Amino acid sequence: MSMHCPISYSNHLVRALLCFGLLFASENALAQADPGKFRFQLQEPAEDAGSAAVRDAFNRPCLESVGVASAHVVNPDLIDHLVKLENRCSRMLKLKICYFTDDRCKTLNLGAYMKEEVFLGAMMKVTRFKFYIFQK
């Protein structure tokens, strides 16, 4: 099914996720689902980690990120915390992604023009989380 996305948003990754959510919701609108449950929830942008953002030749940030809280199908109270990343530059980025007030971090090298989904953690009934990203 092809559908034009009515959302205008400058962040392409967030726009794609929002449009996917609209498409998913429209295809499953007739399903008898519990209105208190959700499949995924977008999070606030990454907090400023104090590291300078790597930029391209046009002074645009190379890294685009969005946090997603995703409920499990079998146990909807168990929520995965994911960070979707996209490198829009021709150089590799060295990243450290952490929960905002915690030492639980993931490190990775994100290749040029690559996309990656990082599993930050899972918690019971915690649908909102904050994270920050150090770039090198």
Image (spheres, helix red, strand yellow):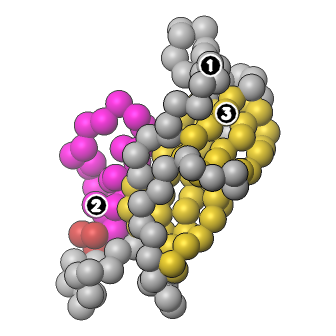
Q: Count residues near mark 1 (Cα–Cα under 10 Å), then give few for <14, some for 14-19, many for 20+.
A: few
Q: Residue at x 41, y 52 (%)?
A: 43
Judge left or right: residue 69 versus residue 80: left
What's under tag 3, amino acid-wise?
Answer: Phe
Q: Secondary structure at mark 2?
A: helix
Q: Is 18 or 122 nearer to us in this picture? A: 122
Residue 93 point in image, percent of width and height? 74, 30
Residue 31, labelled with which disc? none
Q: Is residue 16 magenta?
A: yes
What's under tag 1, amino acid-wise?
Answer: Ala
> Cα distance, mark 2 to mark 3?
31 Å
Q: Nearer the viewer, mark 2 or mark 1?
A: 1
Residue 132 point in image, percent of width and height? 57, 41
Judge left or right: residue 36 versus residue 116: left
First along the sequence among labels 2 and 3? 2
Q: Residue at x 66, y 45 (%)?
A: 97
Q: Which residue is mark 2?
A: 22
